[in-house]
Amino acid sequence: MVDAVAQPPRNPGSIKRFIERYPFLPALVIMLVLLALNGLWQPRSVGLVGLTGLAKTYLALMLLAVAQTYVIYAGDIDLSVGAIVSLVNVVIVAFMSAMGGDTITVLAAMVIGLGVGLACGIVNGVVVAVFRLQAIVATFATSIFFTGLALWVMPVAGTPAPATFWRAYGGRILEVPFVFWAVVVLAIMLYLIARTRLAIQLLAVGDDVQGAYQSGLPVTAIRMRGYALCGLFAALAAFCITGDTASGDPLVGGKMTLFSVAAVVLGGSALAGGHGTVVGSVFGALIIGLINSLVYFVGTPSEWQNLVQGLAILIALVAGILIGRRARS
Amino acid sequence: MSMLAEIAKRPLVVALVLIVLLLAAGELLSPGFASPTQIMRLLIVAALLGIVAAGQNLVILGGREGIDLSVGGVVSLSAIIAGNLMNGADSGIALAILGCVATGAFFGLLNGLGVTLLRIPPLVMTLGMLGVLQGLLVVIRQGIPSGRAAPGLSQFVTQPFLFGLPGIIWLWVAIGLLLAFLLSRTVYGYRIYAIGSNEQAARMAGVPVATIRVSLFVLSGVFAAIAGICLLGYSGSSFANVGEQYMLPSIIAVVFGGTSLAGGKGGYTGTMAGAMMLTVLTGILTTINIDESGRQMIFGATLLLLMLFYGRGQAMRA
């Protein structure tokens, strides 16, 4: 990939082919432009401290966007990812505060958190793939159920996470901030998952479900696995939220659901399924983060910030889709 | 017998039976739940949801994954605009209605143009528009107070008007009749089904596909705006994001009414029953004495259970 980008395009069709091959390229360009603009307005924001802060705040959204991508690969959607984040957040915080905050407890809490995320993903998979309910409304219903569970575990926000947990998340290993290690591990994980049979099967189901079925793919099981993978990554996102906010909140993830969908679209994946990359979704999450910080850095009055952010995200969504389509046509 | 079986399978019939069962269950759980005054209150709340769902229904019928996630934002925006334009005076009602309907139509038009001219998927376009509307709400709320409902409007929504029923219920019935007529007796209605079930064929038959699709989004904005005005009348004053609660429930009401999310199949009569069903269910859950957590779990589980009656996808076949 690195060679491909370094070489100048030999004919006008080359750029098109690159974008077709790497649908995340428009997102990468938009992200780099936003990064440059951020640096122009606030040079410190692209320094080590600024970038660490960005990664710390938006790592959760990056992971959630990845989670959403695996479901969207197969042409499905998961509107419960935010509720899963909330549920895992309160479960691990409640567990750690009950058991004390030593390292063993933290590790046990993470295992439990992954289990909860996986269970939620399987529930979604069952209602959508096995019971064949429509994904949008069915996962909205499960999101209400998961939110109820989260409220049952922790009725009000505010239980603090043990210091071991958030110190590790905000700390450094070998002088390098922890979140950067996390990004590296994430990159390796995404690379490995992209090479598995499951990733290709999900895309095949999303591209043509009838064709996939007729060529002998176990469509129901594949869609279930997509939701299960989504639940696992939502749990990872919950760990990051917990590290960033250092407390439990039964509604913390609710607002993230629609942003995760927006990040996937910004990353060049097709909502209809069958076409996309997880890397693009990571870029999409960063684009949302960079838009938010840029709006702040250029000195937008605080009451106008949400509107300018909303407009910028809408424009980025539309532009990304138009560029991607032009490349494929 | 087979005809009876056919009728029993119709979504409208299923919804009506479920409403009666839910009302009976509510009466059992807390006596007085199904009293006439309570039922009227439920009808008012259902009308608010039902009016939002009317626009949602049209957009979904039009197909090509039609959906409008921005309705909640339009409801909130309309409530605050109406509150400020009338500011507690009956003389401002006409202006408020005009202003809100124009606002709703404007955002619907933007959605429609994005979906047709730029060919952005409706989910993405209306999701982006929702973000813009939420930002706009923050701006508006910083600058001006939330405004108050005119007494005439509150009366229209909450007080008996004709045969003991408030005006909003008659408005809802009128919208129901209008849409039933529109969808089953007019060229426009047939064209909605045509573009929803097979856009290519509709285009070849000379249906102005883009114009119709834009009009559906405009209508969705207008219905959401009307619901926003009524919501202001119901609660007296508006508060931030008051409309958010309508976004996904309006879609569920449509699904419970038997309209397919794939488009081209269904109608509004079922959606009205769907809205009533959702409202009765929510009503039961607020009357029984349990924690918010238990309430949400039961609500989510019941929604899933009810969905098993409707719109399940086809089993895969080789």
Image (cartoon, grey):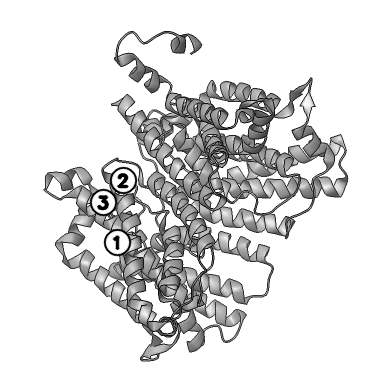
Q: Nearer the viewer, residue A214 or A324?
A: A324
Which residue type carries mark 1?
Leu
Q: Are marks 3 and 2 on the same chain?
A: yes
Chain of the residue displaying label 1 = B
Q: Quadrant of residue B204?
A: top left
Give the mark nearer the N terminus: 3 vs 1: 3
User: What residue would you read off at disc 3?
Assistant: B196
In the rendered structure, the answer to whether residue B185 lies left or right of residue A269 reads left
Relative image position of residue A149 (x, y in whole percent) = 67, 56
Which residue type carries mark 2?
Val
Residue in view at x 65 percent, y 22 percent: A184
Residue in view at x 56 percent, y 78 percent: B26
Secondary structure beneath dot 2 equals: helix
Circle on res. B219: 1
Give the mark nearer the N terminus: 1 vs 2: 2
Secondary structure beneath dot 1 equals: helix
